[in-house]
Amino acid sequence: MKAIINANIVLNDRVISDSALLFDGVIRDIVKYEDYDSDKVEEEIDANKKYVFPGFIDIHIHGFAGYDTMDEIPEAILEISKGLVKTGVTSFLPTTMTMSMDRIENALKNIRKMMNIKTGYAKVRGAHLEGPFISEKFKGAQDSKYIISPNETLIENYADCLKIVTLAPESDGAIALIKKFKGEIVFSIGHTDSSYEGAIRAIDAGASHSTHTFNAMTGLHHRKPGVVGAVLLRDDVNTEFIADQIHTHKDILKLMKKIKTSNHLILITDSMRAGGMQDGEYNLGGQRVFVKNNSARLEDGTLAGSVLTMNKACKNMHDSGDSTLCDIAKMSSYNPARVLKLDDIIGSIEVGKVADLVILNERFEVEKTFIDGNIVYDSDKEEINV
């Protein structure tokens, strides 16, 4: 048995500062200090008044540390997994790009393979298919020559690893696809030129998610509410967003929190391979990307994913002034776990759940990351252990 003491333990509804967190591979108990017996503990971790959060879950991330989901080798996903523990991420969905069908299928096969391997790093929970079922008008940094109509065969062949599918609901066959696979796969409205009415039809058909909300979709207008209006209005839609204050104005974070509340917001990074790397030129989906001053853009200035990390996203939400620590725990861990139907085992600090944890200091810098109760990253040692 291990124990974290002298910590501010962040739960979904309160922060506990007078208790010890007991765990091995799973969380065993949270006990008051007067009931804590250190003699029964094999290892004691003093958090020095830092915050203990449930491990972060990034459900929309293309790459990190110089590697990308579309690199076509399982080792790329392994390296992403290894790098992410430095940012407090303990579970993630490698996210594809709009490329050739062969490249997409190869990526999905690699993701499927990595789902079944226990590496000791951040856990691969499945795939997020972002494209190729998108709108050319709102393609963003995706390559338009590979855009196609929704493909039922692709979904059927990879239903075991596909967790989220981003699509434009106005695409031919999109509504039928949503109706057929709803309940099995989360359909996310994104990269879309849909009207408000079209978005509502998709939601009524079973779409329950929106991809990097506000970006690459029709905006909110008082006579044309657009996709943004639809996803903000409907409580049955979870809205992911990139809290880097580049993709969205910092006060939009406040607006989203006010409208959707922390129960329906999900922090993502949308990070590409330059995440955790220096400024310079990189590649995303076969296109040149230039990273400078925390912004990743194509040559024409189009935003091309991000270099955001989950701990920085949490800091930005906290600094916006409207999000409590409990709100942030829900947006970064519990809500994505719920979307993935894994909230019974991960996503919050509760007895019986897996001990995937992260200790953050007051600047939201990662001090330690735990996977299955084991320290896999320690900032004091600047190394990863498995």
Image (spheres, rainbow, N blue to C red):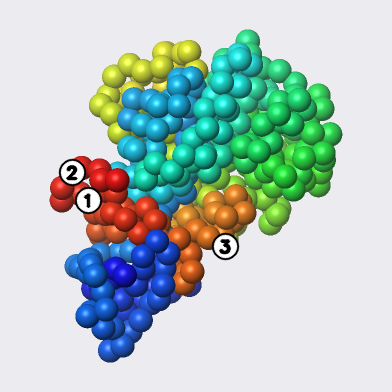
Which residue is at the far top?
145
Q: In the picture, residue 191 is in which quadrant?
A: top right
- What residue is rendered at 56% in x and 17% in y? 103
Tell me which corner region of the image, top left, top right, bottom left or bottom right, holds residue 200: top right
Q: Is residue 85 above or below residue 304?
A: below
Residue ID for mark 1: 378
Residue assigned mark 2:
382
Give whichever of 347, 332 is nearer the camera.
Answer: 347
Q: Are marks 2 and 1 in contact (CB under 8 Å)?
A: yes
Graded by Cα atoms within 10 Å as few (under 14), some (14 to 19) or many (20 or more), the crowding at tag 2 reads: few
Q: How many marks?
A: 3
Q: CA distance from mark 2 to mark 1?
A: 6 Å
Residue at position x 70%, y 54% in the image: 236
Left or right position of 323 against 100: left
Q: Earlier in the sequence, mark 3 or mark 1?
A: 3
Identify the amino acid type marked 1. Asp
Q: Secondary structure at mark 3?
A: loop
Q: What is the distance, in whole Å, between disc 2 and disc 3 at their CAs?
A: 32 Å
Q: Under tag 1, what secondary structure? A: strand
